Amino acid sequence: MPYTLPTLPYALNALEPVIDAKTMEIHSQKHHAAYVNNANKALEGTPFADLPAEQLITRLNDLPADKKGPLRNNAGGHVNHSMFWQIMAPPGKGGGGEPTGDLAAAINAAFGSFAAFKEQFAAAATSRFGSGWAWLCWHAGEGKLKVCSTANQDNPLMGEAIAGCGGTPILGLDVWEHAYYLHYQNRRPDYITAWWGVVNWPKVAELLTAAKAGK
Ligand code: MN
């Protein structure tokens, strides 16, 4: 099988009280697993099964017409969730606080301040109608960070024409109801506010370094 469900870098209850263990269990072991299984089914018998998912989703237009939709959704879902687990950490144990170093400088350069960045990111996450993601992306051409949001399981790596925004994502927030509904019900803004308490800024800084290096 081309793709495998990654092991979480922490226990299911490690992100409490921000994200409850039941949500983490269903989200990581059911929803993410379904994206992996469905992507693997769609990849069967194609010459694309050897490509890492992050590369495959940059080439959706090269796929046979009947594979494009399923892989946009499911390889997209696999890439998005694989990143999501990595850029979170238990509150106070790697999660929360503020970015430092290069990442802090890039955020300040693009948004003016960390507070202004959080406001813009939260607005993107709140205003995404229905299911989707909010992103912080490195734009190599302009040498700056930008915030955007995508629908469903689209990822900026799919490119502007498909996803509606581009760049290399270094932070993503899942705003599908399955990500928060058990604990927050309809209160998406409360989930977004609480979520800052589990963001793994050192990991995001690593992803910025990799994005700048073109990796
Ligand atoms: Mn999700």
Image (spheres, rainbow, N blue to C red):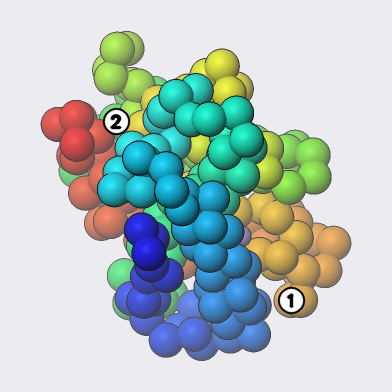
Is 204 in front, or is 6? 6
Residue 190: name its quadrant: bottom right
Is 3 in front, or is 92? 3
Q: Amino acid at mark 2?
A: Ala
Q: Is residue 71 left or right of residue 107?
A: right
Label whose residue precedes the other's in the sequence (1 or 2): 2
The residue under the point 59% across, 66% down is 34
Tell me whether circle 1 and circle 2 mark residues in contact (CB < 8 Å): no
**Can residue 77 be spotted in the picture?**
no
The residue under the point 28% across, 56% down is 203
Question: What residue is shown with label 1?
Answer: 183
- Label 2 CB less than 8 angstroms from ligand 1: no
Residues packed near mark 1 inside 10 Å, few (<14), some (14 to 19) or many (20 plus): some
Q: Position of residue 11 (x, y in %)?
A: 42, 86
Dot 2 falls on a residue whose secondary structure is helix
Figure quadrant, ligand 1: bottom right
Q: Which mark is residue 106?
A: 2
Residues packed near mark 2 inside 10 Å, few (<14), some (14 to 19) or many (20 plus): many
Q: Quadrant of the N terminus?
A: bottom left
Q: Position of residue 108 (x, y in %)?
A: 35, 30
Q: Amino acid at mark 1?
A: His
Seen in the picture, residue 212 relative to 210 is either above or below; the reply is above
